[in-house]
Image: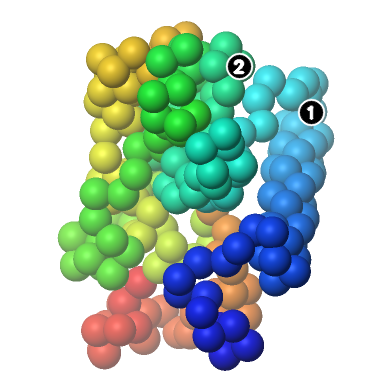
Amino acid sequence: MAAHSGLTAGLDPGSQTGAAWLASHDRCVAWASLNRRLIAERAAAALRADLRLIADVPHNLVRPSDRGFVHYKGAAAVVAGELAPIAGSRASLSYVVRPSAGVARSLGGISHGAGRKYDRATMHGRVGRNRSEREQLLRNSWGGIAICDDRSLVVEEAASAYKDAGQVVTDLENESLIVRLASFRPLVTFKKAVDEAQVEQRRRKPEYRREGGRGHERY
């Protein structure tokens, strides 16, 4: 920001700075795609399952169009006729849809998931107040489990933190943006904290400190 005082006004894609930014952006998008594939391959290996690419749909990116540049913030960039996922929570259905020709009206963007109903900080006062509640959050009604070593993340990513993905899909259908093809129940959900050192520090705290005492140590 300091090197480009006019950045808040936008970048000229034809300028050297703009071209460099777009090139860096594209490398990030490519890295994210490879990362998703690596995660899928490792998950398939762990489950001893076959693997075939069905869809690889990015979100939170910038793409050029005949109308300029479209910033898909909180939206998936899709192509009419190709498959796309719409993720639910770890205790609700997820969906596979096919964007229709009408998606051109939304500049090729649809919801990439249910979206949050409550922010992360708010969730700490809503669920997971004790160990029993937190353990319950790791199960869903059809026997699925969530794998997560971070108590704080378990609470922040609780199913109740998210909107109803089914309603999101219905809204997109009503606008003739997509066709619903299939729904899926999550059987195994894996959540990984970014700061592994912080998670390890939490794990090593004596149980009496995690369950009682100062409020910010309750996970």
Quadrant hosting residue 4:
bottom right
N-terminal label among 2 and 1: 1
At 49% across and 29% down in the image, what residue appears?
108
Residue type beneath disc 2: Glu
How far apart marks 2 and 1 lie (CA) works out to: 27 Å
Q: Position of residue 62 (x, y in %)?
A: 57, 49
* Element marked by disc 2: loop
Q: Please count the marks in the image.
A: 2
For disc 2, the marked residue is: 82
Viewer-proximal residue, 112 or 135?
112
Viewer-proximal residue, 87 or 150?
87
At 26% across and 40% down in the image, what residue appears?
163
Viewer-proximal residue, 144 or 175?
175
At 54% across and 17% down in the image, what residue appears?
80
In the rendered structure, are the residues bearing label 2 and label 1 in contact, judged by CB atoms less than 8 Å apart?
no
For disc 1, the marked residue is: 48
